[in-house]
Amino acid sequence: MDQPLLKKRLLEIKDIFTQYLESQQQRKTQERYKILEEIYVSDKHLTVDDLYQLLIEKKFRVSKSTVYNTLDLLVTSGLVRKHQFGNHLTVYEKSIGSRQHDHLVCLDCHKLTEFCDPRVQLIQNMVGNVLHFDIHQHDLLLYGHCIQENCPHRLVDILLAQNKAKE
Ligand SMILES: [Zn+2]
Ligand SMILES: [Zn+2]
């Protein structure tokens, strides 16, 4: 996205967040807007630690609890999507302006791959119609082992390497 467009989009997003914070009688702090901005300028799936690190690198002082607390607000406002993989990994990404997509998760290295298939939307519409449900969103995760050679945590590779070392 080019700069002026990104700026305009950010202003719109911040405006929505302002309305949300006001409606919930929440404080409109500089930290909260900064965290929102970091998520929207990034094209990645960010963990709490990633976000915290990004803010520190930009010399922005913020506590981890502020990051957690702001993320909760952003998720309930609908501006940010949260994905939880098993017990160990939670990532966040912007929900407005990115194309509709779902995720594949590698069980070994936790690498996330996005895919987009319009049939998922068709299923959502159909289920909504049949069950009289006004569906707002969905979260589809496909778990498996990535068969890319460079998966750093693939058990088979680790065992092979260990056996080689023994030889
Ligand atoms: Zn994604
Ligand atoms: Zn992998």
Image: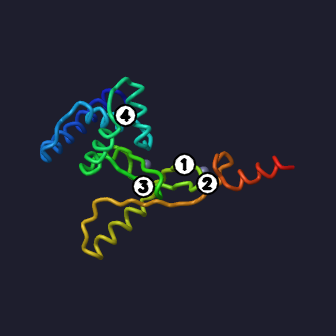
Q: Residue 138, located in which quarter of the rendered image?
A: bottom left
Mark 4 C-beta closer than 8 Å to ligand 1:
no
At 33% from the left and 34% from the top, the residue drawn is 63
> On the image, numbered disc 4 is attached to which residue?
41
Sooner in the amino-acid sequence: mark 2 or mark 1? 1
Q: Nearer the viewer, mark 1 or mark 3?
A: 3
Give me the disc on residue 146: 2
The amino acid pointed to by label 3 is: Gln
Whole-percent x, y for residue 77 in the image: 24, 49
Q: Nearer the viewer, mark 3 or mark 4?
A: 3
Q: Is residue 116 left or right of residue 70?
A: right
Alpha carbon distance from label 1 to label 3: 13 Å
Sooner in the amino-acid sequence: mark 1 or mark 3? 3
Alpha carbon distance from label 3 to label 4: 22 Å
Alpha carbon distance from label 2 to label 3: 18 Å
Give me the disc on residue 3: none
At 60% from the left and 53% from the top, the residue drawn is 108
Which secondary structure, mark 3? strand
Q: Is residue 10 above or below residue 131?
A: above
Q: Is residue 132 above or below residue 121?
A: below
Query: Given contact means CB atoms under 8 Å apart, are the residues at marks 2 and 1 in contact?
Result: yes
Which secondary structure, mark 2? loop
Sooner in the amino-acid sequence: mark 2 or mark 3? 3
Give me the disc on residue 84: 3
Alpha carbon distance from label 4 to label 2: 28 Å
Sooner in the amino-acid sequence: mark 1 or mark 4? 4
Q: Is residue 98 above or below residue 9?
A: below
> On the image, numbered disc 1 is attached to which residue?
111
Mark 2 C-beta closer than 8 Å to ligand 2:
yes
The amino acid pointed to by label 4 is: Val
Alpha carbon distance from label 1 to label 4: 21 Å
